[in-house]
Each structure stands twice: as structure tokens, then as C-alpha cells.
Image (cartoon, helix red, strand yellow):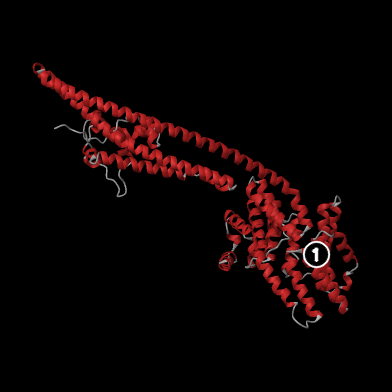
Amino acid sequence: MTKHITLLLTLFICGETSYARMSQDTLLRSLYTFIENKETYMAEKNRKIGEIKHMLETPHISPEQRYDIHLRLQDEYKTYLSDSAIHYIRENTRIALQLNDTYRIYESRLDLAALYIVAGMYIESLEILRTIHAAQLPVELKVKYYNGYKLLYNHYSYTNPHTYVYTETSDLYRDSLLQVLAPASNHYKIVYAEKLEEAYQLKEAREVLQPILENLSEDTHEKAVVAYALANTYKKEGNIRLQKHYYALSAICDIKNAIKENAAMQALASVLYETGEVDKAYECIKSSMEDAMFCNARFRTYEVSQIFPIIQTAYQEKVDKQKSDLLFFLILVSILSAFLIAAVIYVYRQMKRMARIRTELFRANDNLSILNHDLQSTVDQLNQANRKLSEVNTELSEANQIKEAYIGHFLDLCSTYIDKLEKYQNTLHKKAIEKKFDELHKILRSRQMIDHELKELYDNFDNIFLHLYPNFVEEFNSLLQEEEKFVLKSNELLNVELRIFALIRLGITDSSRIANFLHYSANTIYSYRTRVRNKAAVPREQFENMVMKIGMIRKD
């Protein structure tokens, strides 16, 4: 199962997608996915290293072959685990001396000096470089020689009060490096672009770097370096959007190549923090700190440690605020639950009161019937009173039917809502316990639950109302002009206008109350009512009274 997951991740992540064409948001979301799956690339890195180490177990390999295998291991380890890279280069130094091979001696010592710089061992690196003279070296080793000095003094300039002196020295070695590099090579172009960038010739620097990036189809370490250099030009220009984009692109390439000695992630964290994206900045700076400590890259660790406490403090303050907000909402939900329980108790008492009134009405009817038989002399008067009483009873009976139906449904809704509130409270509590504050914040901001409940409320209202008044739509249309009759869609029971007059039929005639129920403004409800009255086939002033009589129970 693990192999299948790894394969899918590899196919998804390692596809030849042009990240440079992605939107900034998409690229950043992709970066956070890569951060979560760093172990996948570390496992692939360890597998590759294991295969190379296995070659050392080959019987009867020559010192030259062992030297070359150590070179491959050093190349894999130098940006991954500096201590291991130093170990294998020291072994190569011993082999080179044993072979008395001048080229290999210089090569291994220059590689060791470069690794000492990564590990923050500047004195040891300088001691090695001072024992070597550029005139003694072939061109390819001069590249390592000048590059070593350039990096050494560049690192000095970050941590030393005499920054200007060391920066000037680093620039001199960079100029020497440019003289020995092939002008057509990417290495030359990248170093030259760095020189242009430091001279604030930003447009010219991008013109050098952009074609290199576009020609790099694979997400290699070189692509990470070029993207990082481009981001630095946009940083000096003040272009936040493209600065984030290229730092993110560089960081993705570093993760995919398991590069632990990296600078893009820490630079991206700084930009995100400056733009107020504290959560994202914390994820990036935490990842950068983990990488620097894993690689034992002291210079990177020093850089990250300068900003890590600042971002961590801001992140903790945000988390504390989210906890306070969560506590507030939990208290609010509890209060609403208490109100809901009180409402259920109130409805229950009202039901009992209605039952008592109904019993009293039936008794009154019986008494009236007895009096009707006993008082023959007042038959005409009693018949008149009986007719009026019958009309009242009819209206009360209708009202009772409506109230019974709605009270029963209201109790069901109350019970369902209590269950939903309890589940919602449990979900919030679970997210709080699991410290999934991003998900919790997303749930609290979402209107999905409210919209769903409103739709369900209107569907229930339509079903129950049409159950009580099955011919309401037809009778309502009979009050309208022929060309103004409402034609409902296949999935509609009532539309907004019909629902307004359905509430009027139930006795809710106040526009404000109707507006509160349907979540419209009172002016909107008033406009709907006026517009429909204007379409009436009956006198406008009688229209709503006639609507009130739709479906009325009639006595035979």
C-alpha cells in the first residue's frame, strides 16, 4: 500500500508541470503540499545514497574507483547532510595523498573547503584555501577555488561588523570566477546575473536569468538557484507578488531534490510575514529551521534563527486569539441551546392550553344546542347566533388544524436542530482539541450550514402549506389576470411571490415579519405585494381578503 501511495505521489509531484506558469496562489498551495510530503523525497534521496554506498562493497575496487564513488556520495550529501559529505571528502583527501595524485589532492581539498563553509567552519576553510595557489590549478579547479573564496567572504559579510570589506573581497573573487568560467555556461550567466543584481541593474539581470529558467524543464537544483536569483531581483524592485512566486518555485525545487542547505524557504517566510500571512510564514520558517538543523548548515541556521522567534511569536498570538474566539462561540452555542430548550417548553405549554380551550369550545357548543331545543320562542335569534358561532368554530377549527400541523412539525424541527447543534458543538470541540485551527476557522466562517438550513426550512414550509391547502396555487391564479398567472418550474412547489401570500393566508400580514422569515428587506416584501395586487383580476383593495379565504372550510 505504501509503495502505491509513493508511486502516486511521485507521478503527481514529479510531472513536468511548468510551475512558472502557475498562479501565485496555486504555486503556494502546491508548496505547502510539498512541505507536508518532504519525507517522501528524503526517502528517495536515502535510497539513491544507499545504492551508491552499496557500490563501495564491490570486491577488489581500486582506490581510484573508491575515490569516484566518494565523489558521488559527497555530491549527494553536500546540500543534504554536510557532516556525511565532509566525512567522504576527508576520505578522498586521504586516498589522493596515498595515490600522490596532485589533481585529486587539490580537488578534494577544494571540495572540503567548500563544505566547511556550509558547516560554518570558516577558519578551517580559509586555512585550506590559503595553502593553494590559483596558478597551480587547471581551469576547472580554478572555478572551485575562486567560488570557494567568493562564498567564504560572502558568508563573512553577513555575520561580521566589517561587512563592506568582506563584500568587496567577495566581489573581487566573483570577478576572477567570471574570468575562468565559459561565457556560454549557465554557471557563468548565474554569477554574472548576481553581479548585475548587486549593481541594481535588475532588468538586465532578469534578461540573463529568465531564458535559463525557461530552458530548464526538470525541477533541478540549478532551477532552484535561478528562481531564487530572480526572486532577489524582484525583492530589490519591491514586486511582492513575483518575489513570492519565484521564492516558492525555488523552495519546491529544493524540496523535490531534498536540498536541506537552502535559502528560498526562509526568504519566502520573511515575505509572507511582512504581508501579514502569519500562518503560512510559520509553516515556511519551521520547515526552513528543520532543514538547516538536519543539514547542520550553521550559516543557514543562524539566518533562520534571526527571524524564527519573531514569526513564532506572531503565530502564537494568532493561535491564542483563535482560542479566545472559539471559547466565545462555544459559550454562544450553549446559550442558544438553552434558549431553544426554553422555546420547546413554551410550545408544549401552549399546546396544553390550546387543548383546554378546544375542550371548552366543544362544551359551549353542547350547551348552545341544549338551549336551542329549550328556547323555541327565540329560535330565530338562536339560529342567527348559531350561524355566527358556526363561522367562528369553522375558523377556529381551521386555525387549530394549521396550528396542530405546524406545532408538530415545529417540535420535529426543534428536536432536529438540537441534534444538529450538539453535532456542530462536538465538531467544534473536536477541532479545538485536535488544534486544527485552520479548519475550525474555515467552519466558523462558512455560510454553507446556514444556507442549507434556510433551503430546508422553505422546502418544509412549502410541503406543509400545500398539504393544508392543496389547491392554493390554482385558486390563487384564479384571482389574477390570465396573462399574469404564475407558472412554476418542475422543481418548485412555491416561488417567492406565492410564499409571501401563503404566509398572508396563514394570518401573517405584517411585511416586517414576512421579511424576517424569508430573509428579505421589508421594502422588498412590500414591492412584491404591490406588484402582485396590480396583476389582480379582482378589485385590488379586496385581493388580500380574498386570498385569506382560499381553501376555507365551509359548513354544509
In front of the other: 372 or 125: 372
Q: Quadrant of the C terminus?
A: top left
Residue at the disc numbered 1:
115
- What amino acid is labelled 1 in the image? Leu
Q: Where is residue 520 drawn, in percent x and y?
A: 40, 36
Q: Quadrant of residue 527?
A: top left
- In the image, taking residue 213 as reference, residue 368 lies left or right, namely left
Q: Is residue 420 above or below residue 236?
A: above
Q: Where is residue 357 drawn, in percent x and y?
A: 28, 26
Determine if residue 304 is in view: yes
In front of the other: 222 or 38: 38
* Secondary element type, mark 1: helix
Q: Quadrant of residue 331?
A: top right
- Of all residues, the one furthest to the right in this rendering is 131
- In the image, taking residue 524 as reference, residue 204 lies left or right, namely right
- In the image, taking residue 390 as reference, residue 326 lies left or right, namely right
Q: Quadrant of residue 118?
A: bottom right
Determine if residue 232 is in view: no
- Of all residues, the one furthest to the top in this rendering is 377
Q: Where is residue 313 drawn, in percent x and y?
A: 69, 44
Q: Where is residue 207 drawn, in percent x and y?
A: 68, 61
In front of the other: 445 or 543: 445
Bin the neighbour count of mark 1 within 10 Å (Cα to Cα): few under 14, some 14-19, many 20 and up: many
How many labels, in total? Answer: 1
